[in-house]
Image (cartoon, helix red, strand yellow):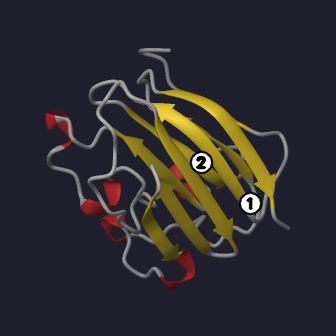
Amino acid sequence: TEGKGGHIYTTELYGDFIVRLEFKRPPGGNSGLAIRYPGNGNPACEGMCELQVLDDTHDKHAELEPWQYHGSAYGMVPAARGYLRPTGEWNFQQVTVVGSQIQVELNGYLILDADLAEVTDFMGGRPHPGKDRRRGHFGFAGHSDPVQFRNISLKQLD
């Protein structure tokens, strides 16, 4: 809901999994996918990571760091840019998490392929407390923008 924040996540815990979904963002929209979220705290720090869902073409996001744009493992690893459909259109995304490895495919293009165990450079120069988390909830990290999700399927791999 526009102007409201908050997180929603699964009741079940996941280790290795694949999630497929569609999303549509409004102009300037910002949200995220919570990966191995412990159920409390900030998904971007306490979970393994937050994968950005962002209208990174909007003027208000012009000055972000590379690891803050759509598909990035927030604050750790930047995703390739240029594969988002225009705002107001549905995008298809698949995320595969196996061990410390995360892959993000957006509209048929691999935009992130990272081993978070190898990350040593963090946003703000502070270590990421949850990056080595092996199990947690999958969820959506709300940032007060009306980003829409549909056709969500999650398959546990372990």
The amino acid marked with disc number 2 is: Ala
Place residue 136 in its image quadrant: bottom right
The amino acid marked with disc number 1 is: Phe
Q: Secondary structure at mark 2?
A: strand
Q: Is 129 situated left or right of 125 in this image?
A: right
Residue 111 against residue 61 in the figure, above or below: below
Q: Is 144 situated left or right of 85 in this image?
A: right
Q: Position of residue 63 (x, y in %)?
A: 15, 49
Residue found 59% across the figure and 57% down from its top: 95
Residue found 54% across the figure and 66% down from its top: 103
Residue found 22% across the figure and 51% down from its top: 64
Disc sitting over residue 34 in the figure: 2
Q: Is 89 situated left or right of 138 in this image?
A: left
Quarter the C terminus occupies:
bottom right
Q: Residue furthest front?
A: 108
Residue 124 against residue 39 in the figure, above or below: below
- Between disc 1 and disc 2, the foreground one is 1
Disc sitting over residue 143 in the figure: none
Instruction: Identify residue for label 1.
Output: 17
Residue 3 against residue 70 in the figure, above or below: above
Q: Is 59 situated left or right of 143 in this image?
A: left
Whichever of labels 1 and 2 marks the residue nearer the N terminus, that label is: 1
